C-alpha cells in the first residue's frame, strides 16, 4: 500500500480511538446537552460525524453524495460512527483505487470529523461529565482498529 493510503488509514484509526474515548461512558443526558442556544447538542454533532464519514465513503467511491441524516438515539449514533469508519477503512484496505484524492479525503471529511470529536470532548467537560485527558502521542492506535473496542490508554498517559 502507498504512504498516503497508510497515513489516511492511520488517521481513520486515530479518529476511531479518540471518538470512542469521547463517547465512552457518557451519561444518558449528555446526548441532549445544550451549551448555548446556538450550539449543536452532542447527539447532533455525532450524527453530523456519521454524515461526514458516509460522505467520505461516497467520495472514495467517486459518487460525491452528501446526506443530512435524521438523528438517531445516542447508542445508535455511536454504532453508526464505528460502522461508517469500518466501511470507509474497508474500502481503503481493499486496495481499490479511490475516486477522490486521498489527501483531500483527509483534509475534508476526516479532518472535520476530528474537529467534531474535539467538540464532544470539550462538551463532556463543560456538561459536568469530563473524560480524562490523554497524551495521544503515546496511544496504541492500530490501522484497521476502528470499532468501539480500542486499546486502553498506556499507563501514565492520562491526566486530569
Image (spheres, grey):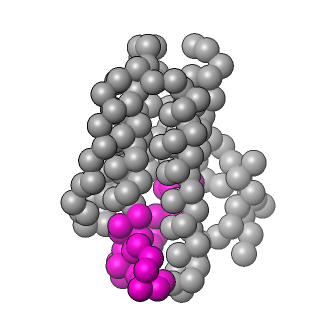
The answer to whether residue 37 is seen in the rendering is yes
Q: Is residue 15 magenta?
A: no
Q: Nearer the viewer, residue 56 or 15?
A: 56
Query: Which residue is located at x 39 percent, y 61 percent?
Result: 46
The answer to whether residue 6 is seen in the rendering is no
Query: Which residue is located at x 41 percent, y 37 percent?
Result: 56
Counting from the top left corner in percent of width and height, residue 87 is at: 35, 33
Query: Which residue is located at x 30 percent, y 28 percent?
Result: 63
Counting from the top left corner in percent of width and height, residue 54 is at: 34, 41
Q: Which residues are magenta?
A: 17-45
For the C terminus, which image quadrant?
bottom right
Q: Is residue 16 left or right of residue 133?
A: left
Q: Is residue 44 above or below residue 69?
A: below
Q: Is residue 44 magenta?
A: yes
Q: Is residue 97 above or below residue 135?
A: above
Q: Is residue 55 above or below residue 103?
A: below
For the N terminus, which image quadrant?
top right
Q: Is residue 134 left or right of residue 14?
A: right
Counting from the top left corner in percent of width and height, residue 58 is at: 33, 32
When asked about the image quadrant of residue 157, the answer is bottom right
Query: Which residue is located at x 44 percent, y 77 percent?
Result: 39
Amino acid at each position: 500500500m502507498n504512504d498516503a493510503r497508510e497515513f489516511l488509514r492511520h488517521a481513520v484509526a486515530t479518529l476511531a480511538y479518540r471518538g470512542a474515548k469521547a463517547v465512552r461512558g457518557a451519561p444518558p443526558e449528555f446526548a441532549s446537552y445544550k451549551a448555548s442556544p446556538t450550539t449543536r447538542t452532542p447527539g447532533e454533532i455525532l450524527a453530523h460525524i456519521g454524515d461526514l464519514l458516509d460522505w467520505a465513503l461516497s467520495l472514495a467511491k467517486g459518487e460525491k453524495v452528501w446526506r443530512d441524516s435524521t438523528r438517531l438515539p445516542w447508542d445508535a449514533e455511536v454504532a453508526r460512527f464505528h460502522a461508517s469508519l469500518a466501511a470507509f477503512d474497508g474500502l481503503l484496505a481493499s486496495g481499490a483505487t479511490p475516486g477522490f484524492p486521498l489527501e483531500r479525503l483527509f483534509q475534508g471529511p476526516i479532518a472535520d470529523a476530528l474537529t467534531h470529536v474535539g467538540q464532544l470532548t470539550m462538551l463532556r467537560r463543560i456538561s459536568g461529565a469530563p473524560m480524562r485527558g490523554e497524551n495521544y502521542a503515546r496511544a496504541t492506535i492500530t490501522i484497521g482498529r476502528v470499532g468501539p473496542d480500542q486499546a486502553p490508554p498506556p499507563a501514565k498517559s492520562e491526566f486530569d
